[in-house]
Amino acid sequence: MNPRRDEMRRTENALEIWILEAKGVPVKRRYYCEICLDKTLVGRTSAKPRADICFWGEHFDYSPIPKVDDLCINLYRDADPKKKKDRSTLIGYVQIKIDQLAARHPVERCGVHFLQP
C-alpha cells in the first residue's frame, strides 16, 4: 500500500503511425518498411508488388508503449526471389524524436534520408 498513491500521476503513452507511400524510388522493385522504437523492431509493412506507385496506406497502433526517445522507419528493397543469395537492402530511413510528437497533433514527415549506393 502506497500512502501517496493519490498524489501520483500516471502517464500512458500511445502511438499511431500511418505509412502511406514512398516517393522517388524505382517502381519496378518491391519495397517494405520496418518500424523501430529505440532500435527495437515493432512492426513491418507488407512488401508491395511492382506497380506504378509504391503505396502502402497501412496503419499501426501501439498502446500502451514504454517511454521511448526515437521512432525510426526504415525503407528496404525486397530481395529478388529469382536470386537465391540476394538479401533485402536498406535504402533509406526517416528518424523522428518522440519529443516532436508529444503535442497530440498529427505530424507528417515526407523526407526520407536515402543511403548512398
Image (spheres, grey):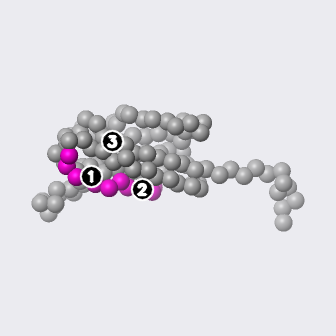
Q: In which quadrant will I find the N terminus?
A: bottom right
The image quarter in which residue 103 lies: top right
Q: In this figure, which residue is indicated by the disc labeled 2?
A: 43
**Quadrant where the C terminus lies?**
top left
104 is higher (above) or lower (below) than 9:
above
Q: Which residue occupies 14% across, 63% down? A: 84
Q: To which residue does mark 3 refer?
A: 21
Q: Position of residue 114 (x, y in %)?
A: 29, 37
Q: Name which residue lies at 49% across and 44% down.
A: 70
Residue 53 pos. (x, y %): 24, 41
Mark 2 and mark 3 residues within 8 Å of each other at the beta carbon? no
Of 30 and 40, nearer the camera is 30
Horizontal placement of 101 versus 110: left or right? right
* Residue drawn at the location 38% of the way across and 55% of the way down: 44
Viewer-side label of 2, 3:
3
For residue 117, side relative to residue 2 (left or right): left
> Which type of secondary structure does the marked residue at label 1 adopt?
loop
Q: Which residues are magenta?
A: 38-51
**What amino acid type should be assigned to the residue bearing mark 3?**
Glu
Which residue is situated farthest in the left direction here? 82
Q: Earlier in the sequence, mark 2 or mark 3?
A: 3
Q: Separation of disc 2 and disc 3 at Cα? A: 16 Å
- Secondary structure type for disc 3: strand
Residue, x 37% and y 47% (percent of image)? 57
Under tag 2, what secondary structure?
A: strand
Q: Is residue 116 magenta?
A: no
Seen as rendered, the residue at the extreme bottom is 1
| Residue 45 colored in magenta in the image | yes
Q: CA distance from mark 1 to mark 2?
A: 15 Å
The residue under label 1 is 48
Q: Which of pointers 1 and 2 indicates the residue nearer the eye? A: 1
Q: Check disc 2 and give the amino acid type.
A: Gly
